[in-house]
Amino acid sequence: MDTAQIDQVRRFNRTVTERVGVLHDHYLGRDRPIGEARLLWEIGEQGQDVRRLRERLGLDSGYVSRLLRSLEADGLVTMEPNPRDRRVRTIRLTDAGRAERATLDGHSDELAASLLEPLNTAQRARLVAAMAEVDRLLTAATVTLDAVDPDHPDAQHCLRSYFTELQQRFETGFDPARSLLPDAGELRPPHGLFLVARLHGEPVGCAGLKLPSDAPSEIKRMWVAPQARGLGLARRFLAELESRAAQHGCDVLRLDTNKALTAAISLYHSYGFREVPAFNDEPYAHHWFEKRVIAAS
């Protein structure tokens, strides 16, 4: 890792924390630290499951519990078991909590305006554009990739969403029964693997890798949710699957795709895949690709 880049990130973090006032226990002039203020905002009008809230913010269970107890003691939230699963607690704002959240929203608007006010029009546009880019890149860095069983609920959610999108985009529609779908066993170790991408604990993409002993490795069912596109996730999937294939001693990586998936085709070309003659009878494929893989040393 480039030490100059690390220094710049740390400098940026110091500037932001100082400028937005997170170093103080009385965030935005209120009688609470930023952690409690953020929880009030995240709980929102509809309430939130504590587990989901914790995953959304990536916080330790004990720390979240302490923050919520403080908010409950101040009469700003209530906690109750979820009627469908009593192991899950639901947190909701009280009337006082909604009023406090509204006050925090107003102060947050004032803080944002104070950051922009000293700048001229061009500088404001540059700052807002830079913030949007930082937000996008930090979101991309938040996405996790995990190998899961193909029957895991998150994997099944991604595959259902993927098939629904193909049904809408392919000229002839998409029927999974006609496609050369790999059996779940082909995407389980040692015969393969299945990756799920998660953003704030929610599944936003998937990709499978077949690792047959007598044929090249093959990428199957790579999909990224619309809300997660533009984060470089598809390229990240390719890099991770190529690395996994290399670790297994594979020297060729294959995939096929439909002509309607023009963005995917462009990605494969830019990533170093080359088009080759058809290597299977996939009825929905119009393009077949291969890439040489350098085996891991």
Image: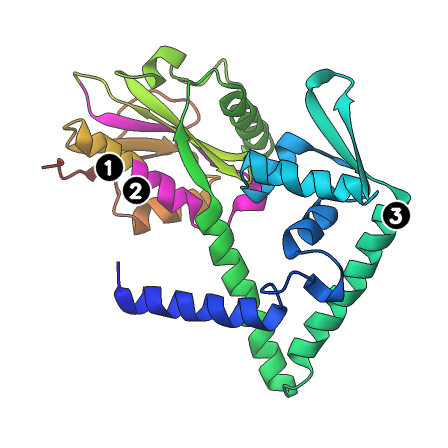
Taking the image as drawn, is residue 270 in sight? yes
Decide which of tag 1 and tag 3 comes sooner along the chain.
3
Determine the secondary structure under disc 3. helix
Q: Dot 2, how many residues are within 10 Å of its Cα: few (below 14), some (14-19), or many (20+)? A: few
The amino acid sitting under disc 1 is Ser
Residue at image x 16%, y 29%? Answer: 250
Q: Which residue is denoted by mark 1 in the rendering?
A: 243
Q: Between marks 1 and 3, how big is the CA–CA gap?
A: 52 Å
> Left or right: 111 with respect to 290?
right
Q: Give the range drawn in magenta.
A: 215-240
Q: In which quarter of the image is the C terminus?
A: top left
**Disc 1 + disc 3, Cβ < 8 Å:** no
Q: What is the x, y in percent for residue 167?
A: 58, 28
Q: Can residue 231 be seen? A: no
Residue to which mark 3 is pinned: 96
Mark 2 or mark 3, earlier in chain:
3
The residue at which mark 2 appears reads as 239
Give the amino acid at mark 3: Ala
The three-letter code of the residue at mark 2 reads Ala
